[in-house]
Amino acid sequence: MLDLKIGFIGGGNMAASIIGGLIASGVPAENIWASDPSTESLSKLTKLGAIHAGKDNNAVINTVDVVVMAVKPQVMKTVANDIAAAAQKAKPLVISIAAGITSDSLNNWLGGKIAIVRCMPNTPALLQCGATALYANTSVSSIQRQQAEHILSAVGINLWVESEAQLDAVTALSGSGPAYFFLLMEAMQASGEAMGLSPEQSQKLTLQTALGAARMAVESDVDAAELRRRVTSPNGTTERAIGIFEQGGLRELVDRALTGAKIRSEELAQELDS
Ligand SMILES: NC(=O)C1=CN([C@@H]2O[C@H](COP(=O)(O)OP(=O)(O)OC[C@H]3O[C@@H](n4cnc5c(N)ncnc54)[C@H](OP(=O)(O)O)[C@@H]3O)[C@@H](O)[C@H]2O)C=CC1
Ligand SMILES: O=C(O)[C@@H]1CCC=N1
């Protein structure tokens, strides 16, 4: 794996996160290629390590074993059409991180019979703390599956889904998920301030509480429901707050929000598949 040549088409936020993770995990920078139209984005990438950075997408395809497609969904078709001839010749493994682009669409735009791993990472990849689900089309070999895992495991945990449709649920849960926790943090912080804490005090206490709760949930051998019960003293303060959350329909609201995100992911696939 150390000799694997890995390319990135699109050198924005997610590409930078994954490249940073790869370098931190010991992949030599000289084995990484990236292309992006923006000189500024390319110079950010070369600050992560001495990677090969340029503006020619086809030069990347002609060089690498695995290419990560990290452009916005709306430009994916144009970019894929532009590199299709080179991809047909070089036949790299293509990993797409784009939301709402099916492996069938991408395969068609690339001219067909391309090994594609479609995945959904999330922004904590920036801290090598990401969560990624992957789906492989039928052209992907077992060695290519390992190559995809090797790349995504540099930025956090990963797991395979056997049905591509499950990626819409993954997008709703973990792809968009960081934003839900940030929203709860914003709301708790505002409430702390409304109750008389300074903005700095409220922010500090909110953030450390979120970090501590997440670490407990990950590291403990009991589930989140049990951890919640252990905070909740009979007739105490937590019981009052949890009761208000439950009466307000929090669980149903969360379910409606995530279902909405899943439906939007499905809509995106239809809008972009033309
Ligand atoms: N942000 C998130 O939370 C998540 C995003 N994703 C997916 O990751 C992908 C990338 O997102 P993100 O990194 O946030 O987006 P960014 O906009 O930060 O990165 C996309 C990059 O692609 C570049 N680009 C545009 N046109 C081309 C082209 N023709 N050839 C090569 N590069 C090009 C853009 O340059 P310029 O800016 O100059 O146009 C930009 O630098 C998206 O498809 C998104 O769905 C997946 C999971 C989570
Ligand atoms: O909001 C979005 O559409 C993208 C996909 C997952 C996270 N951000």
Image (cartoon, grey):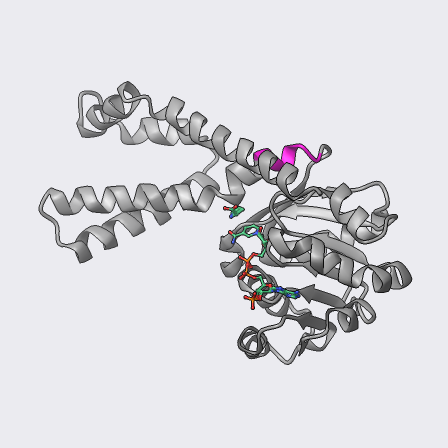
Task: Identify the residue at the far left of this view.
Answer: 196
Q: Which residues are magenta?
A: 164-169
Q: Position of residue 59 (x, y in %)?
A: 78, 73
**What residue appears at the point 50 percent right and 28 percent down from the top-left corner?**
259
The residue sitting at 86% across, 62% down in the picture is 85
269 or 208, nearer to the observer: 269
> Residue farthest to the top?
247
The residue sitting at 9% across, 46% down in the picture is 196
Along the viewing direction, whichever of 19 and 8 lies nearer the viewer: 8
Q: Position of residue 251 (x, y in %)?
A: 38, 24
Please say whether residue 2 is visible from this viewpoint: yes
The furthest residue to the front: 274
Residue in view at x 53 percent, y 77 percent: 40
Figure check: 140 above or below 220: below
The relative height of residue 84 versus residue 158 in the rendered view (above or below) is: below
Query: Can residue 66 be seen at all in this image of the molecule?
Result: no
Q: Nearer the viewer, residue 76 or 252?
A: 76
**Along the horizontal axis of the image, is 263 left or right of 60?**
left
